[in-house]
């Protein structure tokens, strides 16, 4: 699954905007659509961002785009374990929260409530289903994101 197909999977999730960062200058896309640019503090156009890009440069730009009390959720792991230097003043002055999300274990009940309330359609994020006997293969597919794996389910029939 290529990057464009991967992004299309998220079109039905009620995000206000999905941006393919490989297609042009994404900061300009935000500026053109929200027009909240100020020279001192950046664009301040968004409430939240989810970064799954595996690069620190986009995180820094995203922080500058956040409004006061904004949140950034970091789910992309760096390919080379690169250090990340963030615009500290923006974080402190705007009261921004950066949240990591390498594992959803601590959010199990919250996620379950979203599913039960119908706020999240699990069918849209489940990309692979394996029988229990193929569990090792399922973990490999998930770990290496083979065939665009997002969420992999192991069923005990």
Image (cartoon, grey):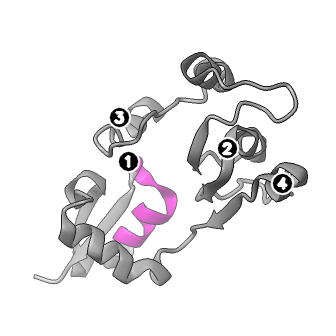
Viewer-proximal residue among 132 and 10:
10
Residue at image position (23%, 81%) is 132
Secondary structure under the numbered disc 1 in the rendered image: helix
26 with respect to 153 (left or right): right
State which tag comes first along the sequence, 1 or 2. 2
Instruction: Name the disc covering residue 66, or none.
Output: 2
Mark 3 or 1, closer to the camera: 3
Q: Is residue 125 above or below residue 33?
A: below
Give neighbour class at mark 2: few <14, some 14-19, many 20+ (Cα, 10 Å): many
Instruction: Name the disc covering residue 8, or none.
Output: 3
Callout 1–callout 2 Cβ contact below 8 Å? no
State which tag comes first along the sequence, 3 or 2. 3
Question: Where's the N terminus, which quadrant?
Answer: top left
Secondary structure under the numbered disc 3 in the rendered image: helix
Secondary structure under the numbered disc 4 in the rendered image: helix
Q: Quadrant of residue 66?
A: top right
State which tag comes first along the sequence, 4 or 2. 2
Mark 4 or 3, closer to the camera: 4
Question: Residue tagged by mark 1?
Answer: 147
């Amino acid at each position: 699954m290529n990057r464009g197909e991967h992004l299309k999977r998220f079109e039905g999730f009620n995000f206000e905007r999905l941006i393919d960062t490989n297609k042009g200058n994404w900061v300009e896309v935000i500026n053109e659509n929200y027009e909240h640019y100020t020279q001192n503090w950046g664009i301040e156009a968004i409430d939240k961002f989810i970064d799954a890009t595996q690069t620190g440069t986009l995180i820094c730009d995203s922080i500058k785009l956040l409004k006061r009390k904004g949140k950034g959720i970091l789910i992309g792991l760096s390919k080379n374990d690169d250090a990340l230097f963030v615009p500290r003043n923006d974080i402190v002055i705007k009261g921004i929260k950066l949240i990591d999300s390498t594992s959803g274990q601590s959010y199990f009940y919250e996620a379950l409530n979203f599913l039960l309330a119908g706020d999240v359609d699990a069918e849209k994020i489940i990309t692979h289903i394996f029988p229990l006997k193929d569990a090792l293969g399922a973990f490999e597919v998930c770990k290496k994101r083979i065939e665009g794996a997002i969420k992999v389910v192991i069923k005990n029939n």
